[in-house]
Amino acid sequence: MKFVSLIGLICIWVCGALALENGLARTPPMGWLAWERFRCNTDCTNDPENCISEKLFMNMADLMVSEGYLSAGYNIISLDDCWLSHNRSESGQLQADANRFPNGIKALADYVHSRGLFFGMYEDYGTLTCGGYPGILNHLETDAKTFADWGVDYVKLDGCYADPSEMDKGYPDFGSLLNQTGRPMVYSCSWPDYQIEKGIQPNYTFIGTVCNLWRNFDDIDDSWASVSSIIDYYGDNQDTLIPAAGPGHWNDPDMLIIGNFGLSYDQSRAQMSMWAILASPLFMSVDLRTIKPEMKAILQNKNIIEVNQDELGIQGRRIFKKSGVEIWVKPVQPSLGDNRSAALAFLNRRTDGTPTRVSIVLRDAGLTSTSGYKVQEMFDGLNLGIFHPDNTLTVVVNPSGVVMVKCTIQKKKSLVSKKKLVGK
């Protein structure tokens, strides 16, 4: 993630209060988030290694660095629900649970920063968080200032115990207050998800001027069924969601559950590929102390991450769906004139026990450059050769698995170089 771009800084300096754009998250944010794996485990007496505590987050910060996740691009480590005390301080400030975070949030943020990482905060635009801890409603200005004072770099704002009809005002108000602190903070919203649940159609054009990323759908669970339902939602609603996404503002299909308990190896590769194709934020929610090497390799695959982090910031589109097989396409760099390279994901949703052959003519995927494309399988880096628009690409995809390729546009050879070759 390019945390702050020059263009973003110019916007902050020049636009000021005229816009909520904060210049952050020019590529999808990447990091580690506690919720899906550790939930609201506050029992540090009986489960001290896995409870929501400063020890857990410090351990994960250390592993983010020592195990190569930071080098791979994951640079945020974030709290989620249940870090709080049930009461605000006498002066009205949020405060951490004193037993589980004895040194306070500022000290934890300082530790995370010392490891070269950004620090993320969780709160809720409501009277309470989803776990029943104090929300920010009626304390917006105080809490924005508190987050800045603590050294927060990323704010995830949930929407429990709040009126979705008031979120069109409340979320922008808080975003503006975050910007006014003068500290750059990526703003993650749950605004659309709560409105959709109540039958309110979110205004994504407006939301994209307020939030850097936002949730549209159900919380992810540790299962292939959950991952599949999210993929379906994004495919079925792509005409609405794709125009809303781009540098600085992203649709968020929720956390990566790779390395937990619910996904097979092939399903894990499928989630990683699809989140890359969707230009999704990549937030791992896994125990980095016990993750298996093959799952770690999926999360750190540089080819897949490169597709996700492509500077064009275009969310991929489903172009084929039949008999349990889907093909998705995401335009990426490099470009040649009006023609772009592309990543293709061949997703097999079938469970009948045998791999499936899937074919596509490159032209049908929008790849029309007469100079041709170098096609590379992404997980293992295998070179599949040079293909032209009317060539057929065929792959074999395992059940509930994926094959992902990148079609890199080739430069046209100049007439001069051709003459030199002939002269030889």
Image (tube, grey):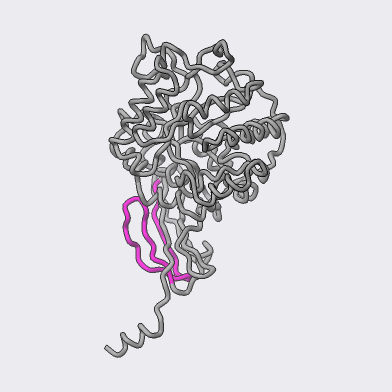
Residue 399, position as x, y percentages in the image: 41, 44
Residue 47 shows up from this direction: yes
- Residue 208 inside the magenta-drawn segment: no
Q: Is residue 368 above or below residue 42?
A: below
Quadrant of the rendering where the N terminus is positioned: top left
Residue at the spot 71% in from the left edge and 33% down from the top edge: 199
Residue at the spot 44% in from the left edge and 31% down from the top edge: 119
Residue 400 shows up from this direction: no
- Relative to the observer, which residue lies in front, 93 or 331? 93
- Relative to the observer, which residue lies in front, 368 or 91? 91
**Which residue sits furthest bottom?**
423
- Relative to the observer, which residue lies in front, 296 or 325? 296
Residue at the spot 57% in from the left edge and 29% down from the top edge: 157
- Residue 376 inside the magenta-drawn segment: yes
Q: What residue span does the magenta drawing correspond to?
A: 372-398
Residue 287, position as x, y percentages in the image: 36, 28
Q: How many marks?
A: 0
Quadrant of the rendering where the C terminus is positioned: bottom left
Lateral position of residue 97 relative to residue 21, left or right: left
Residue at the spot 54% in from the left edge and 54% down from the top edge: 320
Residue 103, position as x, y percentages in the image: 40, 17
- Relative to the observer, which residue lies in front, 402 or 295? 295
Instruction: Identify the image quadrant of residue 76.
Output: top left
Residue 186, position as x, y percentages in the image: 52, 37
Q: Is residue 35 above or below residue 338?
A: above
Instruction: Identify the image quadrant of residue 132.
Output: top right
